[in-house]
Amino acid sequence: MERELHINEILSLLNDSAYHNPEYTKAILNAETGIEFKKTLTTLLIDEGDYSQAQSLLNNLEQSENISQDWLSYHQILLSLFEQEKTIYQMDSTQLAYIIDLAYKCPIDNTVANAQSILYLLYGIEVEDCVELTTRSKRNLVKDITFVLPEDDAWIEDNFPNPFTNETFINYYLPVNSTGSIIINDMFGRLVISYNLNNGENTFIFKKPENLMPGVYTYGYIVDGKAIEYNKMIITQ
């Protein structure tokens, strides 16, 4: 561990503008057998455009039980794009859906952070700090919620799961004698569909219409003609 700390310190210096030397960096990374060093070398090779060597390293890393599948898939997407002289702005729907799903994973690691950066570049979306929900059922992804009835104010919770493929759940409270609806807008703010809500504590189940494409949407909670809250939802393929 002490040796790895020293090597990382040397690598950090070699990547600094004052000591920048990519050839020394690659020589050190090639000499090391640790997975983290091989991951760093793979990223460096992709950045430099040495795609054949990067692919060879990825193929070898796939055989390791200690490598993250998310890390592998993320770098395979990048490598596939760059080999075709494409950019992240030219991802297909499957690749984009994976990046969106990855960006919202908990806990956050470097790969998730990279996916969040891509999401910000593409759509300007800043993913909020994730909170692992210990009360959520892994079987059906429905939270065990104990509602506390407000005296008079309407409220709505974030949809879950998010991202989702076919359906998502939204807990809300609509005061008696009030009218309420949930409206769905696309990423350009255009109204897609709206739903009327029942009064009281309820869970609205949003089932994706067949003609609704995967992507980033917002849903607004409208009470008595006034917008109470807007949240983002992600539909994946």
Image: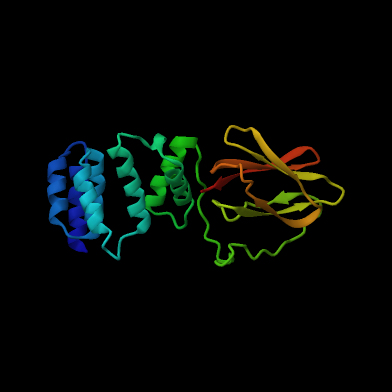
- Residue at far front of view: 210
Residue at image position (62%, 51%) is: 158
Estimate the x, y position of residue 95 in percent, counting from the top left: 42, 45
191 lies above or below 56: above
Q: Nearer the viewer, residue 51 or 35?
A: 51
Quadrant of the drawing holding the N terminus: bottom left
Q: Is residue 23 visible?
A: yes
Closest to the observer, 101 or 136: 101
Residue 111 rendering spot, x and y as whole percentages: 37, 51
In the rendered image, the vertical position of residue 51 relative to residue 135, given as above or below: above
Q: Position of residue 86 (x, y in %)?
A: 34, 34
Residue 145 as seen in the image, left or right of residue 115 = right
Left or right of 64? Residue 77 is right
Q: Is residue 150 visible?
A: no
Q: Residue at x 30, y 34 (%)?
A: 85
Q: Residue 72: horizontal and vertical position, in percent?
A: 33, 54
Give the residue at the far right of this rendering: 177
Would residue 104 be found to the left or right of residue 154 on screen?
left
